[in-house]
Image (spheres, rainbow, N blue to C red):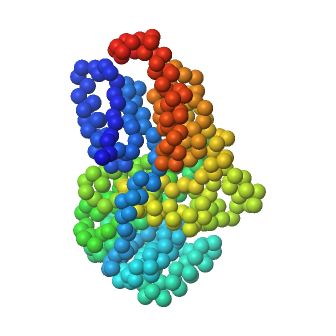
Amino acid sequence: VPIQFCDTEYFVQEGDGNLYARLASELFRVNTFGHVDVRILNSGRYVQRRINSTPYEAAAKAFPMPPEGVIAISGGNGALGLVMGNWLLDKAAEQGVTGFSIQFLSRSMKISDQNLQQWQTIQSKAAKLDIPVEQARMDMSSQEGIDNFLRGVDGKLAGFIHSAGVLQDSMLMNLNWDKFETVFESKHYAALYLHDGLERFSNPLLRFLWLFSSTSVYGNMGQINYSGSNAFLDALTRHRNAKGRICMAVQWGAWGDVGMASTMSDAMRLRTMNSPMPYFTNPEGLAGLEKGLSTGLPYFSVFKFNPHVMLQTVQGADHPNMCHYRNFYCEVVPTPMAPTLDRHHLYTIFRMGRGPQSKNPNAVATCKQAYINPAVAKNEREWGEDFRQW
């Protein structure tokens, strides 16, 4: 039976009426219940930000293709939108389902020379399956544009993949609000307009709504606007699920066969592939998508790792952000040597000591015996069992 462990400060100030609401929120949080421990301190909430999907994949949730209706893909003339369209056609052929159509949505409806071959492949495959596909015009930067689209499908929307997005990367000192608005318009503003439209326009055939996010957990240098917008997509996904609405967010890593990555120089590609988290191929990314779908969770991440490189780059645990990275990396590589032992680090060491349990359960006992037990014994000798003195 899964058990959720929530640890709080021993002394709670009177009048903190929010504590019980926060604890209740933890207990009903689908993603972490029974899989990860939570510690709520006066300084904040501490939890391992990413956990392995393997235990969740046991749910073996199926993804049946809709037998009728319209599947729409925003950013449909872009590389990722075309990859998703091609994957949907493969799923349709695999399941023998052909009663739906796919609209690839964009403002311009123009296919770049770089993506033209992929679009032609989709057209050819769709013709063989007798599935209508088309490039259609849609402006997701306004509520009016979303409403016009929903009126056009006339309640027959069966699925929506929001893959649109633009980048306005800049270091903080060079950022201005226009660069935020440009990113927001194509990402979470558009998703909010769609969410609002779906509340007002009935679409009984709707089976899935996917919001593609990225860099929303840790972020990337120069992408505070993009990371923030993607984090909002994750929050919107949680909100819709809490209200019983269909929604899922996929936190993508870096695709290597499409977009700018496909045209990088050999030297840049070699350097990237030798990094801790290199680009993944289209088949690898789609395999990650299918594993995530099998979990039935509201959102998940798809990444590729170089464990031997990560082992050399695991950081210390001097502040919370470093602890988050270290805990995450320790799901992929062996647990590194612990930092200096003191009461401040006891819980941190315990979290790191748990390591990749599903792969190496013996590491838990070894780390606990080597580091945790001696430190706890020392503190008990010093303070006794009266924890209020801590």
Q: Is residue 261 above or below residue 159?
A: above
Q: Nearer the viewer, residue 239 or 380?
A: 380
Please give the name of the residue rendered at 36% of the width and 73% of the height, measured from the top-left corner.
Answer: 64
Q: Nearer the viewer, residue 212 or 97?
A: 97
Whether residue 325 is visible, yes or no, is no
Whether residue 44 is visible, yes or no, is yes
Horizontal relation, residue 118 to residue 154: left or right: right
Instruction: Point out residue 117 in the picture as x, y percentages from the top left corner.
Output: 61, 78
Q: Is residue 211 above or below residue 234?
A: below
Please give the name of the residue rendered at 25% of the width and 61% of the height, measured from the top-left corner.
Answer: 199
Q: Quadrant of the C terminus?
A: top left
Q: Residue furthest right?
A: 267
Please give the name of the residue rendered at 46% of the width and 42% of the height, measured from the top-left corner.
Answer: 49
Horizontal relation, residue 366 to residue 100: left or right: right
Instruction: Point out residue 314 in the picture as x, y percentages from the top left corner.
Output: 61, 38
Task: Please identify the quarter of the rendering in which residue 185 is found.
Answer: bottom left
Horizontal relation, residue 99 to residue 313: left or right: left
Please give the name of the residue rendered at 39% of the width and 12% of the height, measured from the top-left corner.
Answer: 384
Task: Please identify the quarter of the rendering in which residue 8 is found.
Answer: top left
Instruction: Point out residue 52 in the picture as x, y percentages from the top left corner.
Output: 47, 50
Number of callouts in the render?
0
Q: Nearer the viewer, residue 352 or 32?
A: 352
Q: Nearer the viewer, residue 283 or 268?
A: 283
Instruction: Point out residue 103 in the picture as x, y percentages from the top left corner.
Output: 42, 75
